[in-house]
Amino acid sequence: MSTLSKREKVLLYICVLIAIISSMGVFYYLMLEKVLVLNSDIDLLTKQIQQMHSHMPDEVNLQVKRELLLEGIKELEGGLYTDAEMNPYKFGIWIKDLLLENGLNITKYQTIENKNSIFLEFFISGDALDFIEFLESVSLAEKYWSIPFMVINADKSNGQIEAVFRITYGIMNENI
Amino acid sequence: MNRCVFTEKIDGTYQLYLFDDDEMVDNTYRFDALMMSRPDFDIKVIKIPNVQHGDEHDLLRYRIRSLYPGTPEETVFDHQIVNMRKERHAILFITKKHILEEYREIGNKKPLFLPYTIVNSSIKKYADKNCVAVFLHKYWTEILEFQQGILDSSIVLNIEKDIIFKDFVKLQEFLPERKDDSSFVFFCSKSNVSGLLEVIGKSVMSNNTYEIVSIEEQLDSLKIKNRFLFAEKRKRRLIPQKTRILLLVFLVLVLSGLGLFKYVSYKEQYKSLLAEQLSSLEKQYYRIASIKEETEDLESTFKILEEQQPIDVYLVLSRIFEVIGDRTLVTYFTFDNGSFQFEAVGSDALVLIQKFNSHPDFSDIKILQIVLDKGSDIERFRITGNVNVK
């Protein structure tokens, strides 16, 4: 194996030095470029996180509100009948029985169909206090019984009244 | 290098002398460098081939065997390499080992030198010429011949300085005959300069170019960086200085590169941490957004259901009778989806209206008609309004 001359050694030395300096330069350039890109990315991410924090809704309040609404809805839905639970005929029998139990005379009753509702209209006469008791029973019913229309004629001086009222019950809307 | 002394062996003991007036001092005298006695040394100048720096000493040791009569084990030498054109010459300073040890002992590790050290540093201006240096010592005289600034030969004469001053011809016998433009440089103590001038002036030497140099002045300019002789060899460093500097620069570059790399990896970790945090926040945001949407749906459902809650007619009547009291008799009452109207008989209907208006459950209360009964304060009146009691 032939040994290198001094000139060849110097040239080799210079080549190695240039190679080292070049690779170090490339390395430094790439690293610095990477640092710049990373700094820019970090700035962007920090801003996004700050924006996210500032626009984040209060989860605890929402959860509490949601629970309260669910309870409220459950309570309100408790006052409504399903289609299977009630129908106008069954309801008519209940009201009729209730009126009679309260000593009121039913002169006439009929069914009135409105757009989406069916009402029962009763013409009754009897003692005013008995009618009030009937109304109290309606008020205390387990579910919603509604009297949207009522006329009371108490012109007589003996405490007797004549009344006409329409009554219906709350029914659960499946679409809600 | 202010305090230099020379030494000579007198009656088997080395004595120290100052260069000024050759005054003897005792061994406790503190000095910076010691000039050894030239007769104890042999100076040879030989041509040597180009060899590696480390191999020079071995080569010279080998060559000395043929130049110096002493046994190799008892012989010590120092050398200086000088280059003249493309040739390399070695100036050898050879002596016995025990002599050198005695100098080292008396020198107490101080630098040692020979007249050549002083002369060589003083004849720089004759580098392009030939010159002969004559070093006049109290007990001996050295003649050094230089060619182109490089020592060619050195001889020592056992002629005392004082004898030369008395009979300069004795010296002239030993001086090389010069027909060219060679110069003579005489080295003597400061106190002898004028005397020497006078002596030379009277001799045939006055026809030549000559110069007289004071040894003390040259000693003053002698610096520690001068090449002294037989200096203790310093341990050679394993790595040459240039390589060490390059390695240091390389190390700094590598370390800073590693630092930069570490910084980049730290930044990458930080970025991925932020990205994870953002992703987690996005998930949380979408989850909360769905809860919010669900809550809004529930709110509208609740509103619809609340609107479906019927007005309690029993409570409506109770509230109305609370307002009108016992002294008013209702004769007719109608109720239609929150609106009511009633006819009543009583007193002071306007006060009644005030009460209705101030009650929170009633609104839009209007009195339609008030008819007064003749001869009494009884009024027949009709009132309409809205009620909301659920």
Image: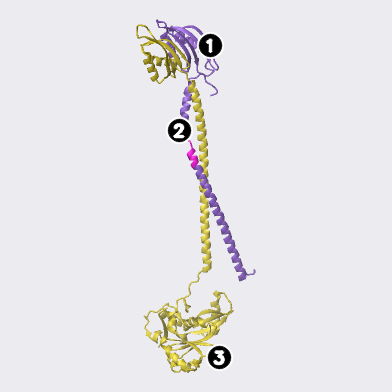
Q: Is B364 left or right of A111, judged from the image as shown? A: left
Identify residue for label 1: A111
Chain that the image shows in yellow: B
Q: Quadrant of residue B195?
A: bottom left
Q: Position of residue B2 (x, y in %)?
A: 41, 79
Q: Is A108 left or right of B5, judged from the image as shown? A: right
Residue type at the position of mark 1: Thr
Task: Tell me where the magenta segment starts and ends, as one range.
Answer: A50-61
Residue type at the position of mark 2: Asn
Q: Position of residue B225 (x, y in %)?
A: 46, 76
Q: What is the count of numbered marks?
A: 3
Q: Position of residue A151 (x, y in %)?
A: 46, 11
**Disc 2 and disc 1 in contact, CB within 8 angstroms:** no
Marks 3 & 2 on one chain: no
Q: Quadrant of residue B177?
A: bottom right
Query: Measuring 50% from the left and 45% from the top, which residue is drawn there?
Result: A46
Is residue B5 placed above or below B381 in the rendered structure? below
Q: Is disc 1 surrounded by few (<14), some (14 to 19) or many (20+) residues within 10 Å? A: some
Chain that the image shows in purple: A
Among numbered discs 2 and 1, the one appearing first in the sequence: 2
Report the Cα–Cα distance between label 3 and label 1: 162 Å
SS assignment for the magenta stretch, majority:
helix
Identify residue for label 2: A61
Q: Residue furthest left?
A: B376
Q: Is disc 3 surrounded by few (<14), some (14 to 19) or many (20+) residues within 10 Å? A: few
Q: Is B53 left or right of B4, judged from the image as shown? A: right
Identify residue for label 3: B179
Report the Cα–Cα distance between label 2 and label 1: 47 Å
